[in-house]
Image: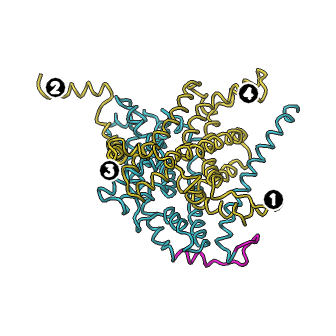
Amino acid sequence: MTRTQTRLAVRHRLAERGVDRQLWLLVPGLACVLALFVYPFAYGIGLSFQPAEGGVFGAYRAFFADAYQRDTIATTLSLSLPAAILNVAASVPIAYRMRGRFRGKRLLTTVLVVPITLGTVLTAEGLLNYLGPAGWFNRLLFFVDEPIRLTNNYWGVFFSLVITGFPFAFLLILSYLSGIDPTLERAAATLGAGRRQRFQRITLPLLAPGLATTFCLTFVLAFSVFPSAVLVGDPAGTTRVISIAAYHAAYEVYDYSLGSAIAVVMGVVELLVVAIVLGLRSLLYTGSTGGKG
Amino acid sequence: MSRRIVASPTSWLIWGAVAFFLINLAGVIASVVVNSFGERWFDTWLPSGWTTQWYATAWTEFGLLNVMVVTLEVAVLVVGISVLVGVPASYVLARRSFPGRRLVYLLFLLPILMPPITYGIPLATVLYKYGFAGHLTGVVLANLVPSIPFVILTMTPFIEQIDPAIERAARMCGAKTWQIFARILAPLLVPGILAASILVLVRTVGMFELTFLTAGPDSQTLVVALYYSMSAAGIRAQQSVDAMAVLYTASMLVLLVIALRFVNPTQLVARVKEDPD
């Protein structure tokens, strides 16, 4: 066999397995992800094992030995988990009522989605103005003696997470719900299922995978809380979240090793939560939701 | 009839909660807007007088023209590059099966599943090491990381909608791959490309963390400038910070309303279904 023939044969065999020249189209995208995501991440992990002192695990030891640093994990989770759960839980009934067609649906959707545009800074400014001691909210509560303190603490950050996270969760849940075939529910109604039964037995199981995904994406948003924790929170105390610790280590103390170590810890914690949720999801029904109705 | 009576308390409760959320949201937004137009506002319901001077102050003090130009440059570059790079990749991922496809897919998903700070810090360190950070280049490169995967995920359902028979017919007629792309797929994909670009535009203009970590003094986008002006409070009048925040939100709102014209929220489902894969 001549050389050209061998090369042709190899190319043919590869093409049969799905490898041909068209795959070159993937290369630019893959190169970007490898150069801008995988390589820096690997570099960061490497850096986190090369601290100035304390051996290979010195940076991690420094993080976990210091209660002020270690507690940022709990602080972050205590903010982001409730916020993500509330956002998803509140979106389900609202989206459930809105999945049909009715007048003004587009307007209501737009209004509910507006907070996406606010950005963390306007939300923070607004919360400080509105919920502050002389703000409108405390003016409405004139019957309470002391103004309620809702900013520069846990609640300020929590509200900011709800304002920015809810529209996102709502949009996703609405899109999942409108992907469930409405005839399934109508069939259940014909067979005599009540409103509650239909929701529990038909809609909820079909929605569950979507709920898990939405929860994960909302959780990622809430977990990376940084600007609002600084602006409406109490960044030195009760809302010192892990991203503040990472930023502080890397760009204020210039300890890149510790900064990378905290970023790695942050990623691991976040992926653990996502893995647990997706693991629970895989126990549930996965498959067709009947297509779009 | 009995069904209606059972249902109405929950209905009331849900719409009540929505109304409560929206009223408080309106309060949050209105307090910033009112403050940005107010002269002095201390312990009263409304400011003592009205003025537009804070907008003028914000415009000159924060060098907003420059900031706006930078924001626009970053957004256009990121959208352009991520569409050029992302669309061909998403075509291959949507149409082809090849060894390692799941791994490639996971690689493209990870940047979206990770909080930006987590990869932003190592990325900024690397960009500083090679001298990219601190300029426009660094900001654009950093923003490409979540944007390319986002384009890929948004485009996948649009590509799946196109009948492969059309491409096969073009190939039968002798078209080459680039010709199929330019003459057949690109025109059919215009709505999808528009949707993806606008979503990436909204995300890039709103992306705080990555820009914050990589921007230098003359490459700040609007969000980052806003953050700096607010965290350095006390030096500037709070009203001019508010005026800037109102400008930011107004521009984002315009973008979002345009985006919602092109993107039907219910179309997201096809994209999201793929996500946890």
| Rendered image: mark on residue B265 | none
* Kind of element beneath mark 1: loop
Say which label, 2 or 4, has the lower sequence index: 2
Between B78 and A240, the one lying in front of the other is A240
Mark 1 closeness class: few <14, some 14–19, many ≥20 residues within 10 Å: few
Say which label, 3 or 4, has the lower sequence index: 3
Q: Chain letter for yellow?
A: A
Q: Which residue is mark 2?
A: A5
Is A159 located above or below residue A212 in the figure?
A: below
Q: Please give left or right for residue A252 compared with residue B25 in the image.
A: left
Closer to viewer: mark 1 or mark 2: 1
- Amino acid, disc 3: Ala
- Amino acid, disc 4: Arg
Q: Are marks 3 and 4 in contact (CB under 8 Å)?
A: no
Which residue shows up at 61% across the image and 43% down it? A84
Q: Which residue is mark 4?
A: A198
Question: In the image, residue A164 lies at what x, y percent?
Answer: 60, 52
Q: Are marks 1 and 4 in contact (CB under 8 Å)?
A: no
Between A130 and A37, the one lying in front of the other is A130
Say which label, 3 or 1, has the lower sequence index: 3
Res A236 visible: yes
Question: In the image, residue A205 lies at what x, y percent?
Answer: 64, 27
Q: Residue furthest left?
A: A2
* Kind of element beneath mark 2: helix
Range covered by the magenta-colored residues:
B41-59
Q: Which residue is mark 3?
A: A52
